[in-house]
Image (cartoon, coloured by chain):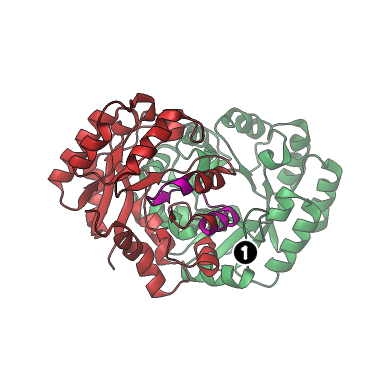
Chain colours: A red, B green
Amino acid sequence: MKIIDINTCFGFDCIDDADLSLETLCDMLDRNRVSKAFTFSRRGIYYHEQGNRETLEAVKKNSRLSPVATINPRDYFSSGNIIENLIEQGFYIFRFFPDEQGWPIDHFLPFTNILKKLNQYRIVVILPAMKGIGKITLIAEMMKEYSFPVILESQPGLAEIAAAMEINKRLFFGIHYFRACMKLEKIIEVMGADRLIFGSGAPVFMFESVFNIVKNADISEPDRDSILHGNISGLLEGLQ
Amino acid sequence: MRIIDIHQHFGPWPFSSGWNIERAMKHLKRVGVETAVGSSPEALCYDFRSGNRNLNSIVEQHDELFGYLVLNPNYPEMSLEELEKYCDNPNFIGVKIHPDYHGKSLDSEAYLLLYEQIENLGWPVLSHTNPGDVSRVRTVVKNFRNLVFIMGHMGTGGLIQPFRGFKEAVQLAQNSKNVYLEISTMPQTRIIEYAVKTAGSEKILFGSDFILDCPSFMYPMVTEAKITDDEKKNILYRNAERLFELPEGFQ
């Protein structure tokens, strides 16, 4: 079974003594025969320059890994050339962390400036699960202005996800938080499987556990394949 | 390995649209859950009496399922009546409380009144527990030394903050003979390994929070943990058989 994992990371956890090392991540990926994993250094959540450097180093060491860039909008000046440099270095997926970095997603000019700049390139944006009902609605509406696809690693309020998918066709959903039983089945029944993307959250979360959600879902094999690799492959075609 | 899942929910949540008993049973079979103990979401979020009644109808149609009676501390008299009504009903084998949904701290006076009766009945109590609840649980078990108190989500509050509070809960389970830990939403095997090493595998029970979460998400946390097969069996089913007085291999 081919697996592409869009949601992995490595680094340090300042709250808990979890082992989030690159070695642990790679062990998990090896054990589960993951073909490709997109990853970022957690340092980059706070210090994007050093973090992105660590990400590139990790990717060089392990051919199965592909890089995800992080930018902290609180340390972004549009006069600089951060984005151009990252694109040049081979990044084509950009991930943001409004909760950890402490900025409001709907009302923060540096972020708007980043999005405008990114809109000039063929890239993909990943936004994380943010707390609060209505966040998916907000992002779906906000991102309609931009031509790049957005993958949302969001907690699944099914009604909100379905409505967001209807108004924004470039919105995709990571399945990590579709842990509630039968929610994957339900969303596929309502919206199809074409915009669901596999991401484990490893090594913060155990790979096998999140994989089991897809493996054990009562869905067709073509839908399972789409989630595990087909959809993301299609999305990234021509970007690499 | 056999699985008895002691933290499930049978019935629809107001914020979920995936519930369907046939599909749920099919799913539990597919992921290998042999027996499950669950409560009614309706009883937690709305009317506990009608929720308990509806749960009873679900459980009595499925030999693999047992129920928790939900008690609401805002209605102490009605709660005691519910206990009286269902105490001899074999479909129910424990009590579920949810201090968040019912807006009362788990060591509040209204709860203490209920614990007294539950302790007399001998049923285990499964409570949703958050970081910060450890001192409250300590107060409860000091007052009710024969009450089996199971800390849902190992004191972490579940999905929202899965890494906070588990160490304090594990230490309490280590030091209190009647405190147990239920593992749903724990995201890493090392948490289980720590709990086994500190509190002992006899103090840990397998739970998934189904249908909010999946037993197959939690299963590898136990099976892949660096603990012995005997310890895995304790967590996955033996402790549940003992605490809920299920006959060994009753299926």
Residue plotted at (39% across, 68% down): A224
**Depth order, front residue of B185/B207:** B185
Residue plotted at (22% across, 49% down): A66
**Depth order, front residue of A177/B248:** A177
Residue plotted at (68% across, 66% down): B59
Quarter holding the N terminus of chain B? bottom left
Residue A58 coordinates in the image, percent (x, y): 18, 41
Query: Does B22 sit above or below residue A54?
Result: below
Amino acid type at circle 1 is Trp
**Residue B87 in sight:** no
Query: Does A26 sit above or below residue A169?
Result: above
Chain letter belonging to callout 1 = B
Secondary structure under the numbered disc 1 in the rendered image: loop
On screen, residue A126 versus residue A34, left or right, reads right
On screen, residue A2 versus residue B67, left or right, reads left
Farthest residue toward the left? A61
**Residue B244 in sight:** yes
Quarter holding the C terminus of chain B? bottom right
A116 magenta-colored: no
- Magenta stretch bounds: A143-166
Q: Residues within 10 Å of mark 1 (few under 14, many from 20)?
A: some
**Depth order, front residue of A236/B21:** A236
How many numbered markers are drawn? Answer: 1
Residue A121 coordinates in the image, percent (x, y): 29, 46
**Depth order, front residue of B84/B104:** B104
On screen, residue B142 versus residue A209, left or right, reads right
Residue plotted at (54% across, 32% down): B131
Residue B129 coordinates in the image, percent (x, y): 59, 39
Residue B70 coordinates in the image, percent (x, y): 72, 50
- Residue B68 in which image quadrant: bottom right
Q: Which residue lies under the disc numbered 1?
A: B19
